[in-house]
């Protein structure tokens, strides 16, 4: 839990839930799992959440709610984007529906009182859809959210009915504002399964995190409607998409897997065609070799291929591990800090620009 965050698309983290279990290939090098088993393994919120397997920490499947931190977002008065359960999964099957409802109530109150944006990411897309479509879930959420708001409303300055003037009766047909609902999807199978649930989940803002990007993804975001004119030929009209934002990035940390630049370009271009905001979070440990050379020495690259000696002088590590991809491109391992987050020479800041 921190009032600031190094994660590029958020401002703060609220680790109300810690602990998880492995469900798909993206989990293999999970940074939260690594931290819980190394640097934070003695912290009360992480102790015992991992076990060592082949010399590496792996989730045990235990999930913990850190109730002492429940009201933290209500104490932060400056508006910010808050990543909820960055080191866990809010919709994990080990959590009771009533516990998740209590956390949601705080989220709604935090947006109402301080204009925070709460960002939720899950791999349990089916459970997310089922809970956020359940009227009984929202009954509890609304009751507890109202209690939080009333407790923090000065009765001398505002009447009781004013305190809920913008705090509606939220539910499947009226999702609360200020809460981003998202899923992670690293390959086509995860995209197909999880985004189908996300599309059907009541939310005022939907997003997908494709990090790490591990395979080609056809997002199929552009849908059209064929219309017949009253006195003329039929024409095709584009339909508004259900998705607001895609965040993409490469993998970082030990054992990080490289991603061909073509995959990131494809995601960027599909978002542009569908009118969906795109955020390129990072290259991660690996960067496209041509992109890296262009970044460190654009004027020299334009003059022709670099020699081994010339590249070394310019800071291009010719001895760094490299990975040759089937499309002819090459990834170079230079580390997350050096790789940066430029894609074809520019930043893509969709998550930062989204309100």
Image (cartoon, rainbow, N blue to C red):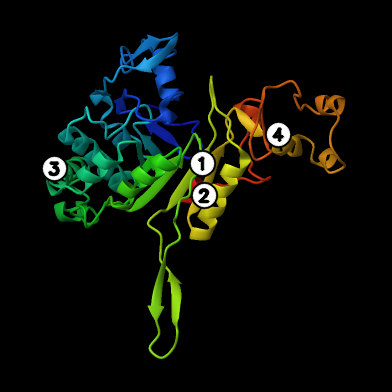
Asked whether the beta carbons under mark 2 and mark 4 sit within 8 Å of each other, the answer is: no
Q: Which residue is mark 3?
A: 140
- Label 1 crowd bin: few (<14), some (14–19), many (20+), radius 10 Å: many
Q: Earlier in the sequence, mark 3 or mark 2?
A: 3
Task: Name the front one of labels 1 and 4.
Answer: 4
Q: Earlier in the sequence, mark 2 or mark 4?
A: 2
The answer, for residue 323, to whether it is visible in the render is yes
The answer, for residue 178, to whether it is visible in the render is no
Q: Whole-percent x and y of residue 325? A: 64, 34
Q: Residue sitting at 79 percent across and 41 percent down?
A: 298
Q: Which residue is mark 1?
A: 248
**Disc 2 to disc 1, C-alpha distance:** 8 Å
Closer to the camera in the image, 166 or 347: 347
- Determine the image quadrant of residue 28: top left
Q: Residue sitting at 25 percent across and 24 percent down?
A: 68
Residue 278: give its label. Answer: 2
Residue 293: give its label. Answer: none
Asked whether the beta carbons under mark 2 and mark 1 sit within 8 Å of each other, the answer is: yes
Say what secondary structure mark 2 lies in.
Answer: strand
Q: Which residue is mark 4?
A: 289
Left/right of residue 317 with respect to residue 127 in the rendered view: right
Left/right of residue 352 with respect to residue 111 in the rendered view: right
**Disc 3 to disc 4, C-alpha distance:** 53 Å
Q: Earlier in the sequence, mark 3 or mark 4?
A: 3
Q: Whole-percent x and y of residue 297? A: 79, 36
**Disc 1 to disc 4, C-alpha distance:** 19 Å
Which corner quadrant holds the N terminus?
A: top left
**Disc 3 to disc 1, C-alpha distance:** 35 Å
Q: Earlier in the sequence, mark 1 or mark 4?
A: 1
Hey, which residue is sitting farthest bottom in the picture? 231
Q: Earlier in the sequence, mark 3 or mark 1?
A: 3
């Amino acid at each position: 839990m921190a009032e600031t965050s190094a994660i590029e698309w958020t401002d703060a983290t609220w680790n109300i839930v810690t602990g998880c279990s492995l469900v798909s290939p993206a989990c293999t090098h999970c940074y939260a799992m690594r931290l819980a088993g190394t640097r934070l393994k003695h912290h009360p919120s992480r102790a015992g959440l991992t076990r060592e397997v082949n010399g590496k920490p792996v989730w045990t499947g235990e999930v913990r709610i850190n109730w002492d931190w429940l009201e933290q977002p209500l104490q932060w008065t400056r508006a910010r984007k808050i990543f909820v359960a960055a080191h866990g999964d809010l919709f994990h099957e080990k959590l009771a529906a009533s516990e998740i409802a209590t956390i949601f109530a705080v989220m709604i109150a935090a947006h109402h009182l301080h204009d925070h944006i709460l960002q939720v990411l899950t791999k349990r897309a089916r459970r997310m859809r089922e809970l956020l479509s359940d009227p009984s879930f929202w009954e509890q959420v609304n009751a507890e959210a109202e209690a939080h708001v009333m407790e923090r409303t000065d009765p001398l300055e505002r009447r009781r009915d004013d305190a809920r003037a913008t705090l509606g009766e939220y539910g499947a047909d009226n999702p609360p504002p200020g809460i981003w609902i998202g899923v992670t999807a690293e390959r086509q199978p995860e995209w197909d399964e999880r985004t189908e649930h996300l599309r059907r989940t009541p939310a005022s803002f939907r997003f997908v995190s494709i990090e790490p990007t591990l395979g080609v993804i056809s997002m199929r975001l552009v849908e059209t409607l064929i219309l017949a004119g009253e006195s003329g030929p039929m024409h095709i009209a584009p339909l508004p998409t259900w998705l607001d934002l895609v965040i993409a990035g490469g993998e970082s940390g030990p054992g990080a897997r490289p991603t061909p630049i073509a995959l990131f370009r494809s995601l960027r271009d599909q978002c542009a065609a569908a009118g969906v905001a795109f955020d390129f979070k990072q290259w991660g440990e690996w960067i496209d070799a041509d992109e890296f050379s262009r970044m460190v020495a654009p004027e020299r690259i334009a003059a022709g291929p670099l020699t081994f000696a010339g590249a070394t002088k310019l800071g291009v590590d010719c001895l760094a591990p490299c990975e040759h991809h089937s499309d002819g491109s090459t990834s170079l391992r230079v580390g997350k800090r050096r790789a940066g987050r430029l894609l074809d020479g520019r930043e893509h800041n969709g998550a930062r620009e989204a309100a």
